[in-house]
Image: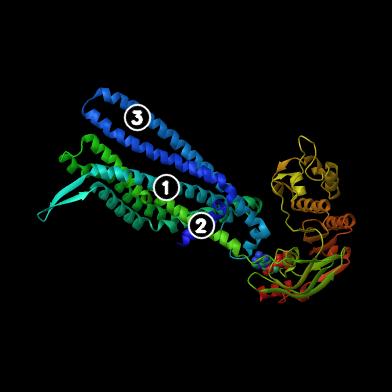
Amino acid sequence: MLLLKQFWSLAKPYWMNPAHWFSWVLLFLSVAALLSVVEATVWLNEWNKHFYDALAAVDIDVIYPLMLEFCGIIALTVVLMVYGKWLQQLVVIRWRSWLTEQLISSWMRDKTYYRMTLGSEPDNPDQRIAEDARILTEDSVELFVGGIQAIAVLIAFTQILWDLSGNLGFEWQGETVHIAGYLFWVALIYSIIGTAVTHFFGRQLHGLNFQQQRKEANFRALLLRKRDAAEQIALLNGEACEQRQLKQSFADITGNWYALMSREKKLGFVINAYHKVAMMVPLFAGIPALMAKTITIGGLFQVRMAFMKVYSGFSWFVHKYQNLTRWSATVTRLGQFTEAMGNLAPIARVQRKTNLCWQNLSIEKPNGEPLVCNIDLSLAPESKLFISGVSGLGKSTLLRTIAGIWPFYHGELSQPQGHTLLLPQRPYLPTGSLRDCLLYPRETETTDSVTGSTNKPMLTDEFLIETLQKVGLAELTSQLEIEAEWQQKLSGGEQQKLSLARALIGKPDTLILDEATSSLDEETAIAMIGLLQSQLPQSTLMMVSHQTALYPLFERHLDLTPYAAKSKPSMEEQACSVTC
Ligand SMILES: Nc1ncnc2c1ncn2[C@@H]1O[C@H](COP(=O)(O)OP(=O)(O)OP(=O)(O)O)[C@@H](O)[C@H]1O
């Protein structure tokens, strides 16, 4: 029940939105095509009787036209099946595109992707957005259309089977008992037994499939991290450790896989035996009617086909058991993910005032442990503030709070008006051209091929080149269009210079630097801060740094040490506690 509720909350926003009427039309056409296949199968069933009777009578005059009719039925069935499937795939991709877009925009909205990492986020959001959205849409449409088809088959062939079965009469305690439509009852009982046994052997597959998807995603994520940290791992000679981690993660996959295999093997015995026996059940069950000469050989084959269809309609659940367990695991995973996004506390909007202002500002870790307490500060526009304090005190966290991404604080906090840019110690350089890296997160301007106009005010190449020269990256000026893994290609200092160039291009009203010059030598760091101050005189500048040489460039200084929630041990104290 919970599963269906979860599924409905995922499916309703798409399917109940009138804007998606065309997907309903496609779904309807797909169902119609597959129902026509059922109709063609009924026709084929009729054909079976005539054909086998004609064969038994060696009636060539009837056999040849029947062969022609067979070709017609098969051609029609194939066309309907192919287009039914094609329409189904069209529905899937439309729904999947919408769902993926919704998941991405919810994940990106209000920095959810970041805020989820601060709590106990559901594992591997990447897998939930990419893989689970695909499985959910594919399996749901397939199971829905397949389910309707199974019901249609059941309805169409129940009548046929009932009529063909006639009355089975047998003696019971001296009386003759008649069972109308006895082959239908055989198919029903056989299917109920099959469904019950399948569910008994397969019921643990839901949990195992859920775990399998999670472990596969963990392994993939671990591999991706190695790629991101390739250089650090190589320098630390961490291969053996990494290999151990990967081996362990893969062992988790294989451990669960063996459990899955063992369950599927048991289920395989049941399902295969069930299907194989099903082929002969109608022939064996039809023998009394054949002996009583109430049906012909052709009729027996017609019975067999009708029985198989009724049985396959009833056994749809058995056929689709593995898909259903995968589908249910996916619904649970996506349901958890969307629920976790929805349950996040609303983001606290930082007030905007002329001055940056903190009153009684206290900041905590996500677990509630206090970091810094009762900070009071007011900073007029265009001020330059240097913030210092020992490592781990909470300086970066204070900057995150000002930037509005750290929700664990109380007290008064207001941000100056206008655009704020925070440059972290490790800049993020997206994959793409150097121009993309330089302009991130602005979109690269494009020129309209017809009118020649640009979709945004153009930042000229001259300006970009001049900016690169100013920050000391003159050698990169010819590579603006080169696409590369710039994060790997540039040195730490060069990456920081590129990040500072972004500030010169973006001209923010408030610029926050979190150890943004830590990889530069002192002389260059001083030159860079001097450059920012001369080029952006109207920007409010705030900088956290351990580079004391920069201190004189700032008119104001805030030492966070007195605000620390608990005093951090000094290096000497730490060294002492180790040696003592
Ligand atoms: N996302 C997080 N989840 C849990 N704890 C965190 C998180 N981010 C930071 N912390 C903790 O908050 C404390 C302060 O971290 P912060 O990065 O603000 O220190 P810092 O003063 O900038 O240190 P440094 O000078 O070494 O950069 C640390 O103990 C850190 O472990």
Please report whichever mark, 2 or 1, sits nearer to the chain's N-terminal start: 2
Q: Position of residue 474 (x, y in %)?
A: 83, 44
Mark 2 surroundings: few (<14), some (14-19) or many (≥20) residues within 10 A:
some
Amino acid at dot 1: Ile
Q: Nearer the viewer, residue 274 or 36?
A: 36
Q: Position of residue 125 (x, y in %)?
A: 58, 56
- Give the CA separation, mark 2 to mark 1: 18 Å
Would residue 168 be visible to someone looking at this image?
yes
Please report whichever mark, 3 or 2, sits nearer to the chain's N-terminal start: 2
Secondary structure at numbered mark 3: helix
- The N terminus sits in image quarter: bottom left
Q: Residue at left 27%, top 40%? A: 304
Which color scheme is applied? Answer: rainbow
Amino acid at dot 3: Phe
Question: Is the Cβ of the residue at disc 3 closer than 8 Å to that at disc 2?
Answer: no
The residue under label 1 is 148
The residue under label 2 is 8
- Give the CA separation, mark 3 to mark 2: 43 Å
Secondary structure at numbered mark 1: helix
Q: Quadrant of ligand 1?
A: bottom right
Q: Position of residue 139 (x, y in %)?
A: 47, 49
